[in-house]
Image (cartoon, helix red, strand yellow):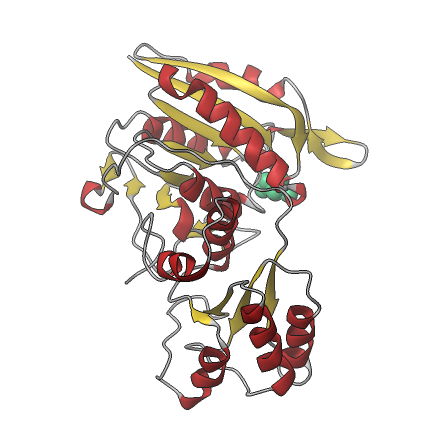
Amino acid sequence: MSRILVLYTGGTIGMDHTPEGLAPAPGLLPRLLQRFERPGLAFDVIEFEQLIDSSAVTPRQWNQIIDALVSRYPDYDGFVVIHGTDTMAYTASVLSFALQGLSKPVVLTGAQLPLVHPRSDGWANLADALEAACQPDLNEVAIAFDRLLLRGNRARKLDAERFDGFNSPNAEPLAQFAIHAHWRRERWLKPEGEWRPTRINENLKLAALMLTPGHGSALAGMALQAGGLDGAILLAYGSGNAPADPVLLSGIEAMKARGCPVLTLTQVMKGAVEVGAYAASQPLARAGAWPGGDLTPEAALGKLQVLLSGSVAGEALREAMSRALRGEMTV
Ligand code: ASP
């Protein structure tokens, strides 16, 4: 018998038609979930008081999910988090780092079409998420979507129209669901260390700044110099290249002087930052930005969010950002 806790936070999957358009419908999803009752599976559903469109997610909701999960952790074999697709990759990333020492499955899912729609993709996504949450050796945070199980901190929402809305461009899936479930256990994380979940500091100010030709780099530099940020990621070009814009570089130096991390990522969907592949990658690194490898922006922000919440700083932060803590980057 597998005991699963389902946390329902909102998202399209449980929405219903209203005169204003689709909106969360309290009570609807827990009712529809009864369809998954079967021998060998027992699940409880917690519907969050405020069901949200996930575009409105904040660190407060992340803490609510962490608290709900942590307080019931010993009572269940696995967890399913039902979440809107818009920010599912951010939440999955945050959870993957916050739930240190996780030794049970935490599987996020949602849908592109609500369950009340006759062609909803939600039924299959829920079925796959529940199945994955019953695997006792899945020690990680994953996303089940359109017949794929993806590592949560590698996943990205890549399509707002098709049912294959998610993929993990720099990592192979953890499973594929067809007539049989094809579990790729050799890719799964091993349980690591003791269970030491952490909450998120809700006051941290992190930004993702995308460099664009023309004034874009200077504008990013101004945001860094303004002094309000605790950390930032720069979405540079290709393998981590950027113009040697003096405003951008002094912005990075100002962050460094305040002890605040700046990470260079690529705005390309696939591939990694590689300092030295091009001369144009050097100025950012010399100014003090750390190369983020093939981290997704969602994973980089989630990792910074959790490490900074735990007051990891200086060399320890740099070291933690340069290696994979939860399978989030290729080293
Ligand atoms: N706007 C919705 C949300 O993220 C989209 C979805 O769930 O598919 O909550």
Q: Within the image, what quadrant is residue 181 found in?
A: top left
Residue at image position (46%, 36%) is 198
Residue 160 location in percent, x, y? Answer: 57, 52
In the image shown, does 5 or 306 lie closer to the viewer?
306
Residue 107 location in percent, x, y? Answer: 41, 34
Q: Mark yes or no: residue 118 visible.
A: no
Judge from the rendering whether residue 200 lies leftward or rightward of residue 220; answer left or right: left
Judge from the rendering whether residue 274 lies leftward or rightward of residue 58; answer left or right: left
Name, please, the residue furthest toward the right.
Answer: 19
In the image shown, does 189 or 82 lie closer to the viewer?
189
Q: Mark yes or no: residue 253 visible.
A: yes
Q: Within the image, what quadrant is residue 208 found in?
A: bottom right
Q: Number of numbered discs present?
A: 0
Give ligand 1's quarter of the image: top right
> Above or below — where is 129 with respect to 296?
above
Residue at image position (28%, 63%) is 331
In the image shown, does 163 or 131 lie closer to the viewer?
131
Residue at image position (38%, 40%) is 142
Q: Quadrant of the N terminus?
A: top left
Residue 119 location in percent, x, y? Answer: 54, 35
Q: Within the image, what quadrant is residue 83 found in?
A: top right
In the image shown, does 89 or 24 lie closer to the viewer?
89
Residue 70 location in percent, x, y? Answer: 45, 25
Judge from the rendering whether residue 56 lies leftward or rightward of residue 98; answer left or right: right
Name, please, the residue furthest toward the left.
Answer: 186
